[in-house]
Image: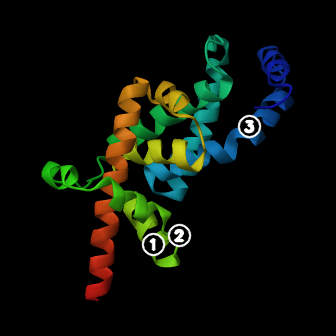
């Protein structure tokens, strides 16, 4: 959060474009990171990010302050990126529910603790295969270090549902990493 964020928002409401530029500079990298992770294409993500900030500028008068500005902004970014992927109708993989249920939590934790280059490469490949909503949640919680409660607010789900989704995503990533390693080993 910016130290003078409230003042900046008031200045923007009065038409101060320099204040909006300051706000954009502060949040643009985080918003872009979220969008590119969901969309998976840098050029399209840049375009969507620009559209998001245009939308934020136009809708700033509707920001009520019930959440933090960053939560409101990330909700707009999340919705815009998800809408973009729906329009593109990207094919995503689906995993067998039985396979997900059979994964031991200790195996998932060991995989997460492995910071080897090979594992990080497999993790990056696995994240790219996730559904856009799952990519967004991984980005918000693990890359942007946003608390689960804020992630839940951004994606408009309950904290409980968000925790369950994160748990399932971790298991999906375990399967995808295991499959990636198996494929790489077979080459």
Residue 104's place in the image compared with 118, above or below, is above
**Gap between marks 2 and 1, in whole Å?**
6 Å
Residue 94 at least partly seen: no
**Gap between marks 1 and 3, in whole Å?**
34 Å
Where residue 122 sits: x, y (%)? 41, 70
Is label 3 in a helix, a strand or a loop? helix
Q: Using a 10 Å C-alpha cutoff, classify the residue at mark 3 as few (fewer than 14 neighbours), some (14 to 19) or many (20 or more).
A: some
User: Is the C terminus in the top left, top right, bottom left or bottom right quadrant?
Assistant: bottom left
Between residue 92 and residue 145, name the one nearer to us.
Answer: 145
Q: Which residue is mark 3?
A: 24
Horizontal relation, residue 114 to residue 147: left or right:
left
Where residue 79 sits: x, y (%)? 46, 32
Q: Using a 10 Å C-alpha cutoff, classify the residue at mark 1 as few (fewer than 14 neighbours), some (14 to 19) or many (20 or more).
A: some
Between residue 51 and residue 7, name the one nearer to us.
Answer: 7
Per the rendering, the mark at residue 119 is 1
Horizontal relation, residue 128 to residue 60: left or right:
left
Where residue 44 sits: x, y (%)? 50, 52
**Gap between marks 2 and 3, in whole Å?**
33 Å
Q: Which residue is mark 2?
A: 115
């Amino acid at each position: 959060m910016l130290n003078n964020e409230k003042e900046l928002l008031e200045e923007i409401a009065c038409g101060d474009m320099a204040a909006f530029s300051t706000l954009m500079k502060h949040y643009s990298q985080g918003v872009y990171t979220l969008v590119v992770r969901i969309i998976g294409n840098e050029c399209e993500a840049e375009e969507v990010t620009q559209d998001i900030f245009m939308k934020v500028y136009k809708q700033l008068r509707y920001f009520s302050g019930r959440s933090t500005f960053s939560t409101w902004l990330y909700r707009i970014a999340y919705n815009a990126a998800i809408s973009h992927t729906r329009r593109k109708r990207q094919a995503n993989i689906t995993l067998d529910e039985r396979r997900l249920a059979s994964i031991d939590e200790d195996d998932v934790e060991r995989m997460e603790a492995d910071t080897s280059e090979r594992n990080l490469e497999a993790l990056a490949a696995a994240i790219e295969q996730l559904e856009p909503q799952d990519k967004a949640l991984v980005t918000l919680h693990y890359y942007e270090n946003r608390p689960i409660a804020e992630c839940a607010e951004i994606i408009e789900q309950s904290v409980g549902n968000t925790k369950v989704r994160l748990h399932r995503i971790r298991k999906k990533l375990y399967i995808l990493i295991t499959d990636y390693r198996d494929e790489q080993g077979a080459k």
